[in-house]
Image (spheres, coloured by chain):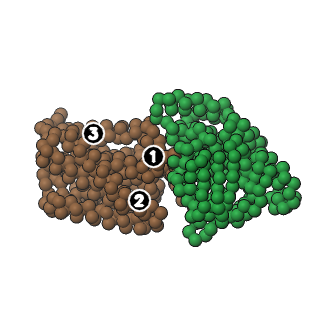
Chain colours: A brown, B green
Amino acid sequence: MLQQVVNGLTLGSSYALIALGYTMVYGVLRLINFAHGEIYMVGALIGLMTSQAAGLPFAPAMVTAMAGAAIVGVIVERIAYRPLRKAPRLAVLISAIGMSIFLRNLALAVMGPQTRAFPIPFEVKQFSTGRFRMSSFDVLILLTSIALMIGLHFLVQNTKIGKAMRAAAEDKETASLMGINVNRVIAFTFAVGSALAAAAGVLIGMNFNAVDPSMGMMPGLKGFTAAVLGGVGSIPGAMLGGILLGMAEVMGVALLKSEWRDAIAFGILALVLLVKPSGILGRNVQEKV
Amino acid sequence: MLSLKNVVTCYGSIKALKGVSMDIAQGEIVALIGANGAGKTTTLKTISGLLTPSEGEIIFDGVDITRSNPEDIVKMGLSHVPEGRRVFSRMTVMENLELGAYSRSGTGSGRKQAQDDLDQVFSLFPQLKGREKQLAGTLSGGEQQMLAIGRALMSRPKMLLLDEPSMGLAPMIVKDVFRIIQEINRAGTTVLLVEQNAHLALNTASRAYVLETGKIVLHGESADLLSNDQVRKAYLGE
């Protein structure tokens, strides 16, 4: 049982990292960035290339992947979303899906369709006591995710740019009257969300020892589900939603069969959308006219 | 201090302002009155950069700001208190005030100044004192209006644009807010006040412009406008 909890936490914390990007972008733009799963993939790919080609150890490869994905995220916002800032939402959604397809095929052109193994930059240890087992991957995923989430919380709550982000999320027009450059805040939000997704991409790519151009699809959808479950737009909600979703999947697989994993996740998505579309910690935002 | 020359602002194909000209001197308190939909809010939004005029020019403190961004205009010392207060309701009173100082914060001396400005805001609005950690959305309407004005003052504006500060407030509170607006003006800040309550506006401001369907139809000393038949009929309900 304790074993399942740890597994759930590990899986859930990586979902939470992805969910944060969805929720932060939704917070400022009321937009679901459907290219987010591909940013996750790009992050994993950059992490793979830097640790493979440059032979970088874990920490620098991670930092490079996060920085690279942040830049890609900012570029995506600049060319696919900013020109459509005043366009109807459907147009932005189509642009997002287009961007997602583009990034996947770009990765396909660059690295080919085959799945690449991730070189493990450190020795993998297994910690076990009785029936309880934990690999150094689990520990690494858990610790990195927690550190990143604490860092994000501090950034959003206590820094000047974090306050500007919250102000822009609440009311962009008034934020600009305060002297806040809203476009810069939006770009920064994409950068942070993309960096978190890249971190998840590297961690999961390493854990499953597999990186391929379509790897962003499923985690992207799971991250989206986690964001909706926690209440899209809410940062603590994304963290909670990720953990709960990871737990539900692991418990479901333990009780049923592993084929049920995705059915459980998307069953939860359908259920949340039916019963409480605003999610656990979400607000019922009234549309402004 | 501020002058508008034949400013035209459109929403799509609809002309909301059809050539508005105004001149406001330093230290003045001037009212802009008019009926619903006359274009009062549009005028303020055009001045502060939220809307861009299609014709005309706006000069603030000797600088052409016709096509400047709102975030640059506030840095030049022109601060806009929007209609409906628009405090950041999910943030604390303190965070709202800090955001008001956003355009100047960061440097060491800026921080010291911000502290002085905070003290000044709390002395103008003692109601806000001791509630720094409260979420702005939980304040009463009057307190939110005071917070919105205090937040604008944190940018050390040379000029303040106030959009309907009396909206939705109890008469006692309105009196309070307007007394403070006059106090701010006496301390040297130029004020352009938009009000639907013409009586209140004309009794507060020294001069006023009357806006009707996107055009200035009348302007002059408040005292003269108060005794003007046209104004009395249309705006004072007499």
- Of badges 1 and 2, nearer the viewer stands 2
Of the pair B118 and B224, the residue shown nearer to us: B224
Residue type at numbered disc 2: Arg
Secondary structure under badge 1?
helix
**In terms of sequence position, does the residue under pointer 2 or pointer 3 come before the other?**
2
Secondary structure under badge 3?
helix
Q: Which mark is residue A144?
A: 3
Name above or below for residue B155 compared with residue A269.
above
- Assess disc 2: are there few (<14), some (14-19) or many (≥20) residues with their C-alpha within 10 Å of its C-alpha: some
Q: Residue at x 12, y 38 (%)?
A: A123
Name above or below for residue B209 compared with residue B176.
below
In the picture of the structure, the residue carrying the numbered disc 2 is A82
Measure the C-alpha gap from mark 3 to mark 1. 24 Å
Asked if residue A190 lies left or right of residue A206, the reply is right
Residue type at numbered disc 1: Met
Measure the C-alpha gap from mark 1 to mark 2. 17 Å
In the picture of the structure, the residue carrying the numbered disc 1 is A165
Say whether mark 1 and mark 3 are on the same chain. yes
Q: Residue at x 47, y 29 (%)?
A: B108
